[in-house]
Amino acid sequence: MDKVLFVLENKEVLVGDVILEFSYLVAAILFVIGLKLMSHPESAKRGNFWAATGMGLAMITTLFLHRDGVTGANISLTNGIVIVAAIVFGGIIGTIIARRIKMTAMPQLVSFFNATGGAASALVALMEYSNPANESALVTLLGLVIGTIAFSGSMIAYGKLDGKVGDIFAKWTTYLNLFLLAVIVAIIVYMMAFDLDMAAKTNLSYVLLAVALIYGIMFVMPIGGADMPVVISLLNSLTGIAAAMAGFIYSNQAMILGGIFVGSAGAILTLLMCKAMNRSLINVIIGAFGGGGVGVDKDQGTVKEITLTDAAVLLAYSQKVAIVPGYGLAVAQAQFAANDLVQLLESKGVEVKFAIHPVAGRMPGHMNVLLAEADVPYTKLVEMDSINPDMPNIDVTIVIGANDVVNPAALDDPSSPIYGMPIILAHESKNIIVMKRGMGKGYAGIENFLFFNDKTRMLFGNAKDTLQKLVSEVKEL
Amino acid sequence: MEQVLIYFYEHKEVIFIIALSIFLGIEVISNVPSVLHTPLMSGANAISGVIIIGGIILLGHADFSTFSLDIILGIFAVIFGTLNVIGGFVVTDRMLDMFKKKKKK
């Protein structure tokens, strides 16, 4: 390991250095292969394993083979022990949290882990900024800001998903955010433009950290409900970019590739989510939703309720049933009850499918994970675009805790804030049963004319209770 | 302007990696069925924990002879990074388990 291989620009290159760089190459390739494999249900588990292997490899080789850029010294035994202790500690905590958490708390957990990644990036950048050997001041500062925003933003997202933090939306948040962003830019420009002494630099980097922390909080604060999938994947993307910035400081290719790779993948996912709502990213961030009195000029008609017995009969004698799940299903934890109903109906010869809207729930693919937990085969989950042409042939569509994603105003009411958003065409099916807690409006705060449709019947109550009662009613038939 | 050119030239390899990684990310993520969006995001999240390498390097060369804020922050960086990496991969694995189970049915 310590054998000098050759001398490059007055620096000795050891065998260990070559092995280290080679291991980074292998790790980077494993990240790419891993994520690629994860885009198929069959190979996804292997993909996750390979990506994790790449990470483990890079961690081990760094620990044993990394040499300081200036002194050329390896990581000493004392430092090594502290590092391993920290890794073991973090690893045990991480494993316990990841294993013990309920599957329904998945969106929160993903946000929480994203926050820790952002925090780590911010800390690394903060300390590297005062390191005189670091020549990439601008990249370091950007890494600090982005990592910090990813951290505080993800913590707020975590709080919101966990129901601990409410939405604050007021016009002033937009202005405050623009102001904070301007302050961040101003501080960075000041730090780059003037030749400051070390103390001033350090102090300013802490100020920058504080402002970025506040910005992250205020940036996520007004965003809520159906926009959460967008903001979660955006924050995910930011963490990746922050990690890449740190990689730039160390000229570490594995970090740069891994970080940018995650950053661009996250950005694409963010845009996909935006597209699913027919809104621009700017629109989501500034938050154009939030209930003005829109579109109340139409004659609403009346909502008609249905008894459980009638609903059971209707379902049991249908041929094709589609279920449209939404966040309400997740809140009521009704996925198991929903699966019971599906199995029961199928045993009676009814064909049942789940119609999944891309932004149903609070994170990308939320409904899929939720239903997977209840053992619903993924072949039963049909994406919006595939099921929509078939909707007129569906005998009964059951809408469980979903609202805006089935609101026909998106198609025919140009004055509606969700106009243009692709929806699941529930109103085209022969009958519609809507399960809802009450007549509250959806996240977008607008009336849903589907509920007033002649073909629609309402089943009010908690989704889980209602589904369980429905199952026993169907059984008795 | 001159500075920008110099900067580009000095960091050309890194800039190449960045440019290509962006396209790689786009390429790998497009055409993913929405069934896998959550595990994919979670897995990508775990990969962004690659910052742990930075944490190890930083703490590895920190001066332990005197007690300083840097050491505390460095330890936290490593702990947070590990949480992100290990927690992320474990939770992704758990999610994917759920998808796998039903395949046999």
Image (cartoon, coloured by chain):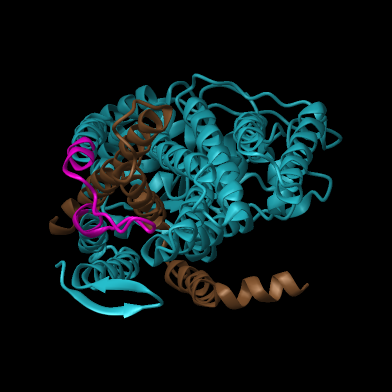
Membership of A429 in magenta stretch:
no
Classify the position of the C terminus of chain A by image quarter. top left
Vertical order, A239 against A422 (above or below): above
Classify the position of the N terminus of chain A by image quarter. bottom left
Give the camera-side residue of A327 and B70.
Answer: B70
User: Count of labels shown?
Assistant: 0
Q: Position of residue A173 (x, y in %)?
A: 76, 29
Q: Which chain did the image draw in cyan?
A: A
Membership of A64 in magenta stretch:
yes
**Is A112 displayed left or right of A357 in the figure?**
left
Residue A312 seen in this snapshot:
no
Give the camera-side residue of B54 and B2.
Answer: B2
**Is A447 displayed left or right of B92 in the figure?**
right
Q: Position of residue A97 (x, y in %)?
A: 26, 31
Q: Quadrant of residue A311?
A: top left
Residue at position x 70%, y 42% in the image: A196
Q: Colour of chain B?
A: brown
Residue at position x 23%, y 65% in the image: A42
**Is A145 displayed left or right of B21 in the figure?**
right
Q: Quadrant of residue A446?
A: top right
Q: Position of residue A377 (x, y in %)?
A: 26, 53
Q: Position of residue A349 (x, y in %)?
A: 26, 53
User: Which residue is at the far right?
Assistant: A297
Residue B51 seen in this snapshot:
yes
Residue at position x 22%, y 29% in the image: A100
Residue at position x 48%, y 73% in the image: B17
Give the camera-side residue of A24 and A302.
Answer: A24
- Numbered range of the magenta stretch: A60-82
**Is A243 displayed left or right of B59 in the figure?**
right
